[in-house]
C-alpha cells in the first residue's frame, strides 16, 4: 500500500538539502556562535549564511531578520512589540485589529493581552472564504490603533488575504501591520518590503526545514520588545544560545523553497486541482472552502456534507492516507474549526470538513490513489 502524506500544512518532512546542511553543524561546527575560537566562528558563519538565505527568500536585508523558534514565537513577538511600543494616551489602551480566521498563535496571544486589559480588540468581518475587505481595515483604524494583524494565507483553507492592499492602507494611516506568513512563505512569492508590513512571521517546518526554527521580519528592529531576557544573542532581542543546526537547515530549506518556485508550485496546483475536480465529479456532497482562484497552490479544504469528518480521517488513515480536519494544534479540541465557523459554516458542516495539503514532493500517483479510494470511504463515513 502506497502511504500518502497530504498533511503538509501541519508539517513537512525535512528535505535532503536541509538535512545535509544540518549534519556538519551538529557534528563539526558545533561551537557556540558567541565565542571567539574557530569552532565558534564556524558556527557564526553558518548562522550568518542562514540569515542571508532567509532574507533573500523574503527579499529583504539580513539585518531585518530576527531568528526565533518558529511561527508561534514570531507572532507573539510581533504583537508584543507593537503593543508595548505604542505611545498610548493616558486612560486609553491600544487597539488591535484582526480577523477571527487567524491562527491561534495570533488569536490566543491577543486574547491573553485583552484579558489583562492591555489592549482592546476589533474583529473585522470575513467573507465566505475568510477574507477581509481592505476598505474595512481603512474604516476600522483609529488614533488608538497600535496594530493590524492579518495573515497572508489561511492555514486551514489556503485562501489568500489581500495583504499588500492592507499593508498600504496601514502605512498610509501610520499604523503598524503584521502578517503571519507561515503558510504563504515558500509557496507563493513574498516580498517583505513591498508588502508594506512592519512584521512578517515565517516558520521552518512548513517548508521542509526542521522544527523549532523560524523568523520574524522586522522593518525596524528598534521596535522589538523581547519576550525573554538574557544574553546578547540576536542583538539582545532574542536571547539564548541560537539553535544553529535547525537555523542552518531552515536557511537551506528557504533557499530551496524559493528556487524555481513558480514551476514547482504550478505543478502542485495541477495536482491539487486534479484532486478537487475528482472530488467534485465523484461525490455529490462536496462543497469547497478553498477558493481555487485565490489560494495557495497546495491546500484544498472541502466540506463533505452528511459525512462524519473524524470517521473519514480514521478511514483514510487505515488506508495509509494522512489528511487532517484543520489546524494540527487544534486536533485535541472537541470544538469544530474556528476558521470554518468564522466563514459562516454550521457546526455540522465544519465537523464534515477535511483539509488536504500537498507539497512539492506529492506525486500524481499519490493523488490518483486518493481519488480512487475516496468515494468508498465517503460512503462508509456517512452519518
Ligand atoms: C498560519 C500559522 N501561523 C502560525 C503557526 C505556528 O507556527 P509554529 O508551528 O512554527 O510555531 C502555524 C502552524 O501551524 C500556522 O499555520
Image: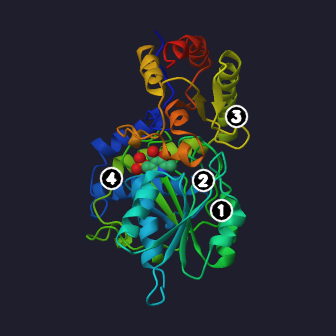
Q: Earlier in the sequence, mark 4 or mark 1?
A: 1
Camera-side residue of 252 and 129: 129
Q: Position of residue 241 (x, y in %)?
A: 28, 59
Find the distance from the CA under tag 4 to the CA under tag 3.
Answer: 33 Å
Nearest to viewer (mark 4 / mark 3): 3
Camera-side residue of 229 and 317: 317
Label 2 neighbourhood size at 10 Å, few (<14), some (14-19), many (20+)? many
Q: Position of residue 116 (x, y in %)?
A: 34, 71
Instruction: Kindly indicate whether the residue at mark 2 contacts the one at mark 4 (C-beta within 8 angstroms).
Output: no
Q: Earlier in the sequence, mark 2 or mark 3?
A: 2
Q: Secondary structure at mark 2?
A: loop
Nearest to viewer (mark 4 / mark 1): 1
Check disc 1 and report the residue beneath it.
195
Q: Earlier in the sequence, mark 4 or mark 3?
A: 4
Q: Position of residue 140 (x, y in %)?
A: 63, 71
Instruction: Kindly indicate whether the residue at mark 1 contacts the one at mark 2 (C-beta within 8 angstroms).
Output: yes
Check disc 3 and report the residue beneath it.
266
Q: Position of residue 82 (x, y in %)?
A: 48, 73
Q: Is residue 1 left or right of residue 230?
A: right
Find the distance from the CA under tag 2 to the CA under tag 3.
Answer: 19 Å
Amino acid at each position: 500500500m502506497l502511504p500518502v502524506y497530504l498533511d503538509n500544512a501541519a508539517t513537512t518532512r525535512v528535505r535532503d538539502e536541509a538535512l545535509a546542511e544540518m549534519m556538519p553543524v551538529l557534528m563539526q561546527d558545533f561551537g557556540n556562535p558567541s565565542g571567539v575560537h574557530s569552532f565558534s566562528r564556524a558556527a557564526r558563519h553558518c548562522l550568518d549564511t542562514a540569515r542571508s538565505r532567509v532574507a533573500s527568500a523574503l527579499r529583504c536585508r539580513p539585518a531585518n531578520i530576527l531568528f526565533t523558534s518558529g511561527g508561534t514565537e514570531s507572532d507573539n513577538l510581533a504583537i508584543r512589540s507593537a503593543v508595548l511600543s505604542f505611545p498610548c494616551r493616558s486612560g486609553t489602551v491600544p487597539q488591535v485589529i484582526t480577523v477571527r480566521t487567524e491562527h491561534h498563535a495570533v488569536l490566543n496571544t491577543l486574547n491573553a493581552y485583552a484579558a489583562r486589559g492591555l489592549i482592546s480588540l476589533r474583529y473585522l468581518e470575513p467573507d465566505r472564504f475568510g477574507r477581509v475587505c481592505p476598505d474595512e481595515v481603512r474604516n476600522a483604524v483609529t488614533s488608538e490603533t497600535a496594530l493590524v494583524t492579518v495573515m497572508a494565507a489561511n492555514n486551514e483553507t489556503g485562501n489568500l488575504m489581500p495583504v499588500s492592499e492592507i499593508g498600504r492602507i496601514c502605512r498610509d494611516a501610520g499604523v503598524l501591520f503584521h502578517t503571519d506568513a507561515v503558510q504563504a512563505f515558500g509557496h507563493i512569492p513574498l516580498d517583505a518590503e513591498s508588502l508594506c508590513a512592519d512584521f512578517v512571521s515565517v516558520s521552518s517546518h512548513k517548508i521542509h526545514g526542521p522544527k523549532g526554527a523560524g523568523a520574524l521580519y522586522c522593518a525596524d528592529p528598534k521596535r522589538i520588545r523581547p519576550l525573554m531576557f538574557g544574553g546578547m544573542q540576536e542583538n539582545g532581542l532574542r536571547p539564548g544560545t541560537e539553535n544553529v543546526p535547525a537555523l542552518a537547515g531552515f536557511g537551506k530549506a528557504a533557499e530551496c523553497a524559493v528556487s524555481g518556485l513558480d514551476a514547482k508550485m504550478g505543478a502542485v496546483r495541477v495536482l491539487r486541482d486534479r484532486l478537487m475536480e475528482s472530488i467534485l465529479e465523484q461525490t455529490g456532497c462536496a462543497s469547497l472552502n478553498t477558493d481555487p482562484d485565490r489560494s495557495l497552490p497546495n491546500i484544498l479544504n472541502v466540506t463533505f456534507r452528511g459525512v462524519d469528518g473524524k470517521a473519514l480521517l480514521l478511514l483514510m488513515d487505515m488506508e495509509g492516507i494522512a489528511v487532517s480536519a484543520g489546524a494540527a494544534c487544534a486536533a485535541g479540541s472537541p470544538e469544530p474549526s474556528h476558521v470554518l465557523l468564522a466563514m459562516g459554516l454550521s457546526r455540522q458542516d465544519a465537523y464534515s470538513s477535511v483539509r488536504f495539503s500537498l507539497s512539492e514532493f506529492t506525486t500524481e500517483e499519490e493523488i490518483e490513489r486518493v481519488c480512487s479510494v475516496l468515494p468508498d470511504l465517503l460512503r462508509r463515513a456517512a452519518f
